[in-house]
């Protein structure tokens, strides 16, 4: 949750993807210190960053996304949907099979 909040706070300074990439690069070592280190590494305005991390709207957005994910069957990351159908077999053959099924479906 704290990493997601921090990434969205970084977004308010135009650095979401940079922050995102560094979070994933350091996912085994994430803690409060590492999150602040990443923010400093990206030259974020730390006062604004800390203020934005406390913005309750960010937590509301994350909780909304979590609820939506639970509703549609997301149980972890990555979860892949093709044309609204959950991809269970994430091999190349699995992708191809589900895409071909989706292409054969009549358009309404």
Image (tube, rainbow, N blue to C red):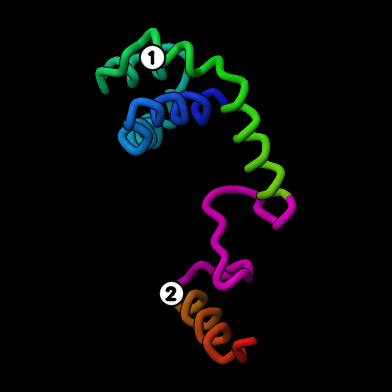
Q: Main secondary structure of the magenta part?
A: loop
Q: Count the marks: how many?
A: 2
Q: Position of residue 24 (x, y in %)?
A: 39, 36
Q: Residue at x 65, y 53 (%)?
A: 74
Looking at the image, residue 43 sits to the left or right of residue 104; the answer is left
Q: Secondary structure at mark 1?
A: helix
The answer to which of marks 2 and 1 sits earlier in the sequence is 1
Q: Residue at x 29, y 15 (%)?
A: 40
Q: Quadrant of the N terminus?
A: top right
Vertically, is 2 above or below 82? Answer: above
Give the residue furthest to the top: 47
Q: Position of residue 54 (x, y in %)?
A: 55, 15
Q: Find residue 11 and name its label.
A: none
Picture quadrant where residue 61 is located: top right
Q: Position of residue 5 (x, y in %)?
A: 52, 26
Vertically, is 51 above or below 92? Answer: above
Q: Nearer the viewer, residue 86 or 49?
A: 49
Q: Find residue 36 and name its label.
A: 1
Q: Secondary structure at mark 2?
A: helix
Q: Which residue, given by chain and number where applicable, does mark 2 sit on? A: 92
What is the span of residues highlighted in magenta in the rendered image? 71-92
């Amino acid at each position: 949750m704290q990493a997601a909040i921090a990434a969205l706070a970084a977004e308010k300074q135009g650095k979401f993807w940079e922050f995102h990439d560094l979070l994933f690069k350091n996912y085994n070592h994430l803690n409060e210190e590492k999150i602040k280190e990443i923010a400093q590494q990206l030259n974020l305005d730390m006062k604004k960053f800390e203020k934005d991390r406390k913005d309750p709207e960010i937590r509301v957005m994350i909780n909304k996304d979590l609820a939506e994910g639970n509703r549609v069957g997301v149980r972890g990351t990555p979860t892949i949907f093709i044309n609204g159908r959950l991809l269970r077999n994430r091999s190349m053959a699995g992708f191809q099979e589900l895409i071909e099924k989706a292409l054969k479906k009549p358009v309404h």
